[in-house]
Amino acid sequence: MRKIAVSAPFLACGVWMAALGLYFMLLRPALLPEDLRYFGKTLAEVQGFAPELSAWLRRVFTVMGGFMSAAGILTVLAAMHAPRSRAAVAALALAGASSVVLMSAVNFAIDSDFKWLLLAPALLWAAGLAALLLDRRSNERI
């Protein structure tokens, strides 16, 4: 039971990442309103300049979503083994830095409409990593 409690933040993030990947593969529109604001263009202007952009982005988001889902699935697997493995702890730390933390930072940099929402997984990941390290330290003392 303790193993699940310590790994719970990573399990939640892994499921969230897999679900977000499905969203990107199946539901995310090619361009969000915030994308157009960032470009400083209307949808008509973008479509006039690059009429195939939406089709191209659909493919890009399908591939990206697949990788996101895969990362989420592997995060769940690593979280299930983390309390017993230093390698899993290291993998979770690196995976968090290169996924949810980086995603959150970029969304703040571009002033995304979703920046505060996307901060939550990064904070959850950091809390999970801290709990996991504290748990490992207390187990080493026993």
Image: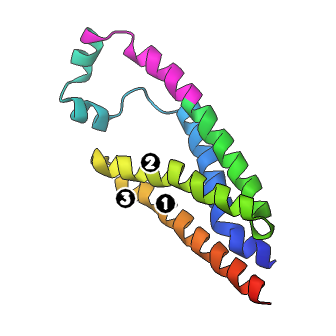
User: Which SS type dominates the magenta stretch?
Assistant: helix
- Protein image colouring: rainbow
Name the residue tied to disc 3. Answer: 116
What segment carries the magenta color? 49-63
Across and down, in percent, residue 88 comes to 72, 59
Label drawn at residue 122? 1
Spatial CA span between label 3 and label 2: 11 Å
Tag 3 secondary structure: helix
| Along the viewing direction, whichever of 45 and 17 lies nearer the viewer | 17
Disc number lying in front (3 or 2): 2
Q: State the residue at coordinates (45%, 22%).
A: 57
Tag 1 secondary structure: helix
| Along the viewing direction, whichever of 49 and 32 lies nearer the viewer | 49
Is 61 covered by the magenta stretch? yes
**Would you say 57 lies left or right of 46 here?**
right
Query: Within 10 angstroms of label 1, few (less than 14), some, or many (20 or more) residues?
Result: many
Upstream in the sequence, badge 3 or badge 2? 2
Quarter holding the N terminus is: bottom right
Across and down, in percent, residue 130 comes to 58, 74
Asked if residue 26 shows in the view, the reply is: no
Name the residue tied to disc 2. Answer: 103
Q: Residue furthest bottom?
A: 142
Q: State the residue at coordinates (53%, 67%).
A: 126
Q: Indicate whether 97 appears above or below 137.
A: above
Query: Within 10 angstroms of label 3, few (less than 14), some, or many (20 or more) residues?
Result: few
Across and down, in percent, residue 78 comes to 74, 56
| Along the viewing direction, whichever of 9 and 22 lies nearer the viewer | 9
Quarter holding the C terminus is: bottom right
| Along the viewing direction, whichever of 46 and 64 lies nearer the viewer | 64
Spatial CA span between label 1 and label 2: 8 Å
**Callout 1 amino acid:** Ala
